[in-house]
Amino acid sequence: MTKLLKSLWGRFLFQDSGILPTKRLLFIFVLLSFIFFLSSFWGISWESIIAVNLLVLIVSLFDLFFTPKKKELSFRRYMPIEMERGISYQVPIEITNHSTFSFNFQIIDAVPQSFKTAFPLYGKAEKEAMVHTTYEAIAPIRGKYEIKKLYFRYTSPLGLWEKQLTTEMIDMVKVIPDLSETKRYLENAQAFLLHEGLKIRKHQNGVGEFSKIRNYVVGDDPRKINWRQTAKLREVMTNEFEPEHGKYVTVLIDCGRMMGAELKKGNRLEKSLEAALTVSAAALKKGDYVSVLAFSKDVSVFVPAAKGMAHLQTILQAIYNIQVDASESNYAEVLHYLEMVQKKRSLILLFSDVRTFLHEENALLYLKRIRQRHLFLMIGIEDQTLIKRIGMEPDELQKAMSKSIAQQQMLIKKREKLKWEKQGLHMIEASEENLATSAVSYYIDIMNRNLL
């Protein structure tokens, strides 16, 4: 295909600049052709056919003089700098018409193909006026994207011709993990910690740092009554404690092959990222130091420990673009690396696939050494397929065989987990909907019990 043909083809695909006939003009010529075909039975001359076609074409071309020139139009796109994965965003586009002609228009924005949008956009711009139009965009895949162009078509007053132009407008947008769970925790931490009907304790009696003095309420420990303030205010006052601040939390995120397994919404890595950010926000809000390490066969990202809510943005910018690696995870390598970079005692939270991890005998040697200094907790996502097959009724031979194999796999997993837990390496599994909730709940419980 020659360069001219490529340009013409791109023009019809809404990807180039130029002038195109509208459906209305094509319909007029089709109608004329039908009339000429019928007239041919009465001996109409070729001169008459050519003359009428030229006349219609010339009249239609005059219609182009009543459309704005390209330099009389300006555009501006208000693309958000960051978009959360799977969340709908409104993207406004501003069109300024500096000419004395009004027109109808169509817009297609050159967003990445993975974005979910509805194009083209239709609208009308009045003369010497500014018009705003908005489209909805949903980004299902994390990453950093560059949007370079905006494709614009506008028609003449009679709607016989369309002018098309391509505007260069470069915007950078980052698609970050869904932070709905993190925001929900920061808005109402205690409500977020209601898991399976159990209210997580704020602290253990008599353990932690002094927080404040408040009024005594039913259910408080009488041993914590502050008698001096009670006598001064003539009201029963009690001391309130909270877990010690300044502990170290290390979050490990597995990016290996098994983390690419698809779930109801996204994959295991997506859910692990969301849970890791939520538990990081919980730890930073309570004044703890948080470091994050993402790995597969090698260490991909390492964010050193720091405290303060501003550090959450540092973590987010470092890990928002990590992807699933096609290779297997090298747990021994990452644990060896962790021994070198994390010298202070910390809570290690590993987000990974429990079933894969259980068969890593080499990792057990490193974990035994790490366990001497750190507290280890692994968090995985339940295999819903396995649970479903265990719970199905064995009313057929094939179902009975599938159920027995699933039960056998579950027993093997429990036996292996018991072996690891005897070494002091705890593992839990949660459903994808409750992964973030479970991670924060266990973190709070560990801090309440002062295990660090």
Image (cartoon, rainbow, N blue to C red):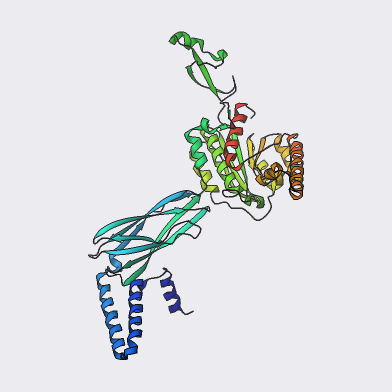
Q: Which residue is depicted at the point 61% across and 33% down? A: 442
Q: Which residue is depicted at the point 31% across and 64% down? A: 104
Q: In which quarter of the image is residue 123?
A: bottom left
97 is higher (above) or lower (below) than 52? above
Which x, y percent locates residue 363? 73, 44
Residue 254 seen: yes
Which x, y percent locates residue 234? 44, 9
Q: Which residue is depicted at the point 33% across and 70% down? A: 163
Q: Quadrant of residue 380?
A: top right
431 is higher (above) or lower (below) than 134? above
**Residue placed farthest to the left in the image?**
100
Q: Nearer the viewer, residue 132 or 124?
A: 124
In which quadrant will I find the C terminus?
top right
- Residue 338 relative to residue 129: left or right: right
Q: Nearer the viewer, residue 113 or 223?
A: 113
Residue 22 seen: no
- Residue 411 relative to residue 160: left or right: right
Which x, y percent locates residue 316? 52, 45
Which x, y percent locates residue 239? 52, 17
93 is higher (above) or lower (below) than 336? below
Q: Nearer the viewer, residue 323 or 299?
A: 323
3 is higher (above) or lower (below) than 254? below
How many callouts does the rendering have? 0
